[in-house]
Amino acid sequence: MSLGVKDKVIVITGAGRGIGRAIALLGANEGARVVVNDLGGTPNGSGADAAPAEQVAAEIRATGGEAVANGDNIAAAGGGERIIQTALDVFGRVDCVINNAGILRDRMFHNMTPEEWRDVIDVHLNGYFNVSRAAAPHFKSQNSGSFVHFTSPAGLIGAMGQSNYAAAKMGVVGLSTGIAFDMARFNVRSNCVAPSAWTRLLSGLTARNKEEEERFARLEKSMSPEKIAPLCVFLATDAAAGISGQIFKARGNEIFLMSQPRPIRSVHRDGGWSLQSLEEQMLPAMKSSFVKMENHLDVFSWEPI
């Protein structure tokens, strides 16, 4: 029988609220020693407050668990190194990094500012790199480790007004896949989770119509952050040692294994292609297989189970 995460050291970014908090509490309840990282900023990334991380760490310790708070910014220079160093200083090792922290700067692309683009990329993509890169040498030397990176249906499928967020979250998939390949020989695995839960980030979304507004109200009641935590903690266990390079989606009581880009149709023409042959031969051969442009809310159109 698997020992789960007992005595494993798990670093969780953005763990002061929402999904990160739920993961920290569950991990500690299962015997993990937890680094609760959270800058304590607003949903758009502004400001800082040490209280959320401190409160979660205190809550864990009050129930007999082991936890330490860290308020470093994952997007800042040296932030990732200081977060991992906190784990080493307090617990002596690190076994799992769960990259959950995030911000939103939603804007239609034609109105998006360079700052809104860079700020989101800096947290979700550069920030995840910073923390992961700081942990990687320790995983390599101990010949074990697990990364769990949060991606999003907004990137995997699509959403309006979130080109910065979608780009960052698809970049996270590439980051995770690269880590999975590069560190496999050291028994280090890397996976993505696309969560759907009602958090303060999701609550800021604007409904496109009355029907979607009513759906959001139902989702708020059925998609709690606590539903996402078990999969994330499980991926830190030894029982998940054979899982790497995968993308999961968790929503309510549902877990999905998401597809990844692979060839679905091909055409070949001796002598190469011209504009005319592309129109006359490639287009009709492939058109029926083109991916439909759908919002992720349309793809997952049924109520959470």
Image (cartoon, rainbow, N blue to C red):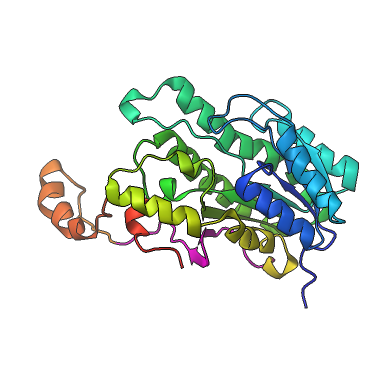
Residue depicted at 74% across the width and 34% down the height: 51
Say which residue appears at 43% left-offset and 41% top-offset: 166
Going by the image, does 61 lie left or right of 286? Answer: right
Horizontal and vertical percent for residue 245? 57, 58
Q: Is residue 30 above or below residue 72?
A: below
Q: Is residue 212 left or right of residue 76?
A: left
Residue 112 lies in the magenta stretch: no
Q: In the depicted view, which residue is nearer to us: 254 or 154?
A: 254
Residue 257 falls inside the magenta stretch: yes
Residue beneath the point at 87% across and 56% down: 64
Observer able to see residue 145: no
For the point 77% across and 73% down, the residue is 2
Q: In the image, which residues are magenta?
A: 241-264
- Residue 193: image x %, image y %? 55, 55
Give percent across and percent down for residue 49: 70, 29
The percent coordinates of residue 284 (x first, y second) are: 13, 56
Q: Depth check: give the residue in front, 184 or 302.
A: 302
Would you place residue 207 above or below residue 105 in this image? below
Dividing the picture into quadrants, the one containing residue 50 is top right
Query: Is residue 68 shown to the viewer in this render?
Result: yes
Q: Quadrant of residue 184?
A: bottom right
In the picture, measured across the screen, residue 38 lies left or right of residue 34, that is left
Total label count? 0
Type of secondary structure dominating the magenta stretch: loop
Q: From the image, which quarter does the N terminus lie in?
A: bottom right
